[in-house]
Amino acid sequence: MADTRQRLLDGAISTIRSHGIAGVSARTIAATAGVNQALVFYHYGSVDALLVAACEAATADRLSAYTERLAKVTTLRELLDVGQALHAEERERGNVGVLAQMLAGGQQDEKLASATAGALRLWTDEIESVLRRVLAGSPFAEIADIPGLARAASAAFIGLELYEGVDAPGAQRALAALEQLAVLVEVVDDLGPVARRALRSRVAKRSRR
């Protein structure tokens, strides 16, 4: 039974990848999984519920593959390196297309929207944890909205993944710009104590405006 459930989960993701969200149905998922379509409803109750479960399972699986590497990140530049490696691997696996389809489907289907947001939240929570560790002690940590920054980073990479499909050079230039921001943070962190205090004071005054 567990094998059938897993085949349905894998079949749902494969169906989105090959047919797009508009081509997803109990029949197409079952055909991809090699099972009777009645099993979709037996195990998950509905196609939407299966898609929700598949989205969550696939995201958790991909995140687990990067957890150890993310745990070793000590700088923003290293975090960007992991992000770029993830970006390249997900595109090669066809998962960027799946994400695009889920995002498109979520515009019209509240359940898909909730499932996609929940899956993205798994990544965002992990990125937030890394940012808190990396920025600890930095002047930026005192004024930065770390949860908001984690969501901005996730949104940026989602946008770049989709953008690369139509303008690869532009996407690479955007990634290079993000690397420049990481360098800027490193430069600030390397300032002496007097300069850091002055910067802190100026940033605090600006943030109160």
Image (tube, grey):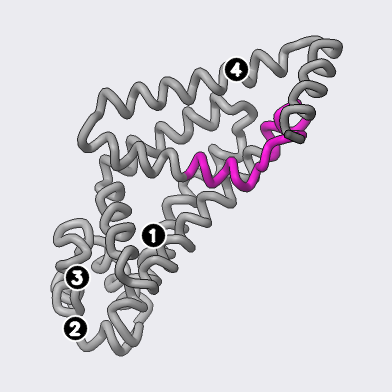
Look at mark 2 in the image and give the residue it sits on. 37
Amino acid marked by disc 3? Val
96 is higher (above) or lower (below) than 4: above
Q: Which mark is residue 24?
A: 3
**Magenta segment range?**
132-154
Q: Residue 17: name its quadrant.
A: bottom left
Q: Position of residue 21 (x, y in %)?
A: 22, 64
Q: Position of residue 79 (x, y in %)?
A: 54, 32
Q: Magenta: predominant secondary structure element?
A: helix
Amino acid marked by disc 2? Gln
| Foreground label between 3 and 2 | 3
158 is higher (above) or lower (below) than 2: above
Q: Nearer the viewer, residue 106 or 63?
A: 106
Q: Quadrant of the N terminus?
A: bottom left
Which circle's residue, 1 or 3, is located before the other in the chain?
3
Look at mark 4 in the image and give the residue it sits on. 184
SS of the residue under disc 3:
loop
187 is higher (above) or lower (below) than 104: above
| Foreground label between 4 and 3 | 4
**Residue at image coords 73%, 34%:** 209
Q: CA distance from mark 3 to mark 2?
A: 12 Å
Look at mark 1 in the image and give the residue it sits on. 58
Q: Residues within 10 Å of mark 3 (few under 14, many from 20)?
A: many
